[in-house]
Image (spheres, rainbow, N blue to C red):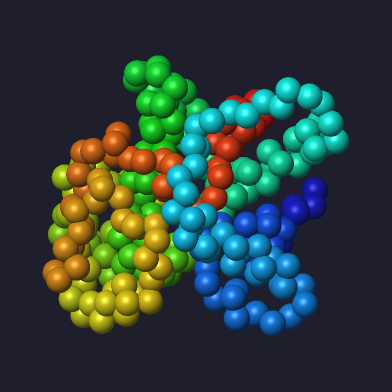
Amino acid sequence: MLVKKNKFKPIYKQLVRLRENVQNRKKLLKFKKQKWKQFIYYYKRKLKRYRKFKPNDQTQYIVSKFPNRANSYKKRFKNTLYTSKKFRLFYGNLSKKYIKKKIKQTFKKKTNHKFLHFHLTFFEHFEHRLDTILYKSKFSINLRNARQLIVHGKIFVNNKLVKIPSYKTIPGDLIKVNPKFSHLIEKNIKYSNIWPIPPKYLSINYKTLEIIINDNIKNINISTNFTFNLNLEKILVNYNKN
């Protein structure tokens, strides 16, 4: 039986197909080829202050009152696939299998069944990842860079070397950087994007390059955690059915 190999897709081509700069990469603003012009035009519009800092209700589920071509079955199916891809790409191009596993764990977990708390429980699986924390703290310019720092042995958790990007931290954990590579982190902080700002559940000391995980992730503001409209309900329904 032939095994189908996964083809490597360049990150910027994926962003064009999704029509959204999911990873907030400003490098594409320098691209001059014709195929990038329309995408760059719409991205620049989103960078305007009134759009950039506009909060989005990520838990809202929109149902159209009237059927039309825009909400046909084919269109809705395509939008659902693109929404799922955006979410996976935002957290570093995670696999479908990994996302589905985390959704099942969220459904099985005994917690408050209120709608908002359910979404926050789902987010915890991704926000507590070590690579995500480094990226949200501006210690890396993107998630790929964060994973390189971890795999190459530059990050310590509770004074223990950790080389697993998906390592799940818990409240009270102390994350440190190997002093030999502090210049790399300082350079990343200098060139990282200011928005979105680091979340409140992280206590960051930029002088000593240390991060402490707090126990207030339940207070995370999902509306400003993403620079695009997520449509989280579509992701949960899509992976829960399959």
Vertical placement of 23 versus 102: above or below? Answer: below
Could you say which is closer to the camera, residue 6 or residue 91? Answer: 91
Vertical placement of 56 versus 113: above or below? Answer: below
Could you say which is closer to the camera, residue 242 or residue 90? Answer: 90
Find residue 84 and report its image quarter. top right
Q: Where is residue 42 in the image (x, y as percent from the top left)?
A: 65, 63
Find residue 73 and report its image quarter. top right
Could you say which is closer to the camera, residue 1 or residue 227? Answer: 227
Query: Residue at the spot x=37%, y=66% of the render?
Result: 194
| Left or right: where 180 falls relative to 128 | left
Q: Position of residue 216 (x, y in %)?
A: 23, 38
Name the residue at the front extreme.
Answer: 50
Vertical placement of 182 versus 51: above or below? Answer: below
Find residue 67 and report its image quarter. top right
Q: Where is residue 40 in the image (x, y as percent from the top left)?
A: 65, 69
Question: Is residue 147 at all visible to an observer of this figure?
Answer: no
Question: Is residue 115 at all visible to an observer of this figure?
Answer: yes
Could you say which is closer to the camera, residue 92 or residue 203? Answer: 203
Q: Quadrant of the C terminus?
A: top right
Query: Residue at the spot x=23%, y=77% of the render?
Result: 182
Vertical placement of 127 versus 176: above or below? Answer: above
Q: Where is residue 70 in the image (x, y as percent from the top left)?
A: 80, 37
Query: Residue at the spot x=69%, y=82% of the render?
Result: 32
| Left or right: where 69 falls relative to 131 | right
